[in-house]
Amino acid sequence: MKIKSIITAALALLVSTSCSGGTKQEKVMTKDGKALVVFFSHAGDNYAVGNIKVGNTKIVADYLTELTGAEQFEIITHKYDGMAYNTLIELAKKEAKDGELPAYEGDVDLSPYDTVFIGGPVWWGTYPQVMFTFFKKHTNDLKGKTIIPFTTHEGSGLAHCVEDVKAAFPGANVQKGFSIYGHKVRTEKAKVEKWIKTLNP
Ligand SMILES: Cc1cc2nc3c(=O)[nH]c(=O)nc-3n(C[C@H](O)[C@H](O)[C@H](O)COP(=O)(O)O)c2cc1C
């Protein structure tokens, strides 16, 4: 009898602990784990949205932080600042063709994180090359950890991004991924919320 009540009390404690997170969807993170959103996003002249002050992917990254409590590391380069869309399109095409690895500012220690969201726009069928600079630098840092890729795009969906993340981080548990149209991110926060609710640790 006594053992039964101890087990009941332990279960009640477990349930109350796992439910104590307010509205945050903390279940996306592994037990007691921390999550990080690593993303690149290009503000400025862009397809379908005109000249935007905040990039489409950054808006999704901010939703993720709000909904899950995940911290952020933004991959920043000033290489494309103020560039007209048509110029950027050509430059990005050349970068991808040549496998260039543009430098980014600062860096992040991935060791405290169990779950890492990786997000960016689709550029010519995959993530922008500057994200590959990040991937190359951190290729051994996510072994045994969970990676959740996402993209914003204008028709290509996830394109080749998930495959490229899998190749870039051997030994990581790379999940299915999520994509959303760039021109819809400002009005479709609910879609991001719905996705977050489907994630399992
Ligand atoms: C250089 C460049 C290449 C792009 N290539 C693609 C593409 O191959 N497929 C696609 O669906 N969208 C493509 N897009 C559209 C972007 O993926 C889309 O606008 C995205 O939401 C931009 O996100 P950001 O504002 O966070 O940079 C491209 C945009 C740019 C600037």
Image (cartoon, grey):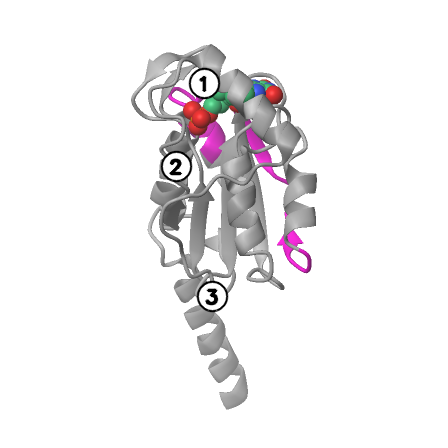
Cα distance, mark 2 to mark 3? 23 Å
Q: Is mark 1 within 8 Å of ligand 1?
A: no
Q: Nearer the viewer, residue 34 or 164?
A: 164
Q: Measured from the top left, where is residue 197 in percent x and y? A: 51, 42
Vertical position of residue 102 compared to residue 89: above or below: below
Residue depicted at 68% across the width and 48% down the height:
166
Q: Nearer the viewer, residue 25 or 186?
A: 186
Residue 110 visible? The answer is yes
Question: Label 3: which residue?
Answer: 111
In this rendering, position of residue 36 left or right of residue 175: left
For discs 2 and 1, the disc positioned in front in the rendered view: 2
Magenta residue span: 170-192
Mark 1 lies on a secondary structure that is helix
Q: Is residue 184 magenta?
A: yes
Residue depicted at 45% across the width and 40% down the height:
39
Q: Measured from the top left, where is residue 192 in percent x and y? A: 47, 33
Q: Nearer the viewer, residue 30 or 74?
A: 74
Tell me the amino acid under the disc marked 2: Thr
Mark 2 or 3 closer to N-term? 2
Cα distance, mark 2 to mark 1? 25 Å
Question: Label 2: which residue?
Answer: 77
Residue 181 visible? The answer is no
Tell me the amino acid under the disc marked 3: Ser
Mark 3 or 1 closer to N-term? 3
Vertical position of residue 63 compared to residue 123: above or below: below
Vertical position of residue 165 compared to residue 15: above or below: above
Residue depicted at 63% across the width and 32% down the height:
98
Please tell me how many numbered marks the rendered image carries. 3
Question: Label 1: which residue?
Answer: 184
For discs 3 and 1, the disc positioned in front in the rendered view: 3
Cα distance, mark 3 to mark 1? 33 Å
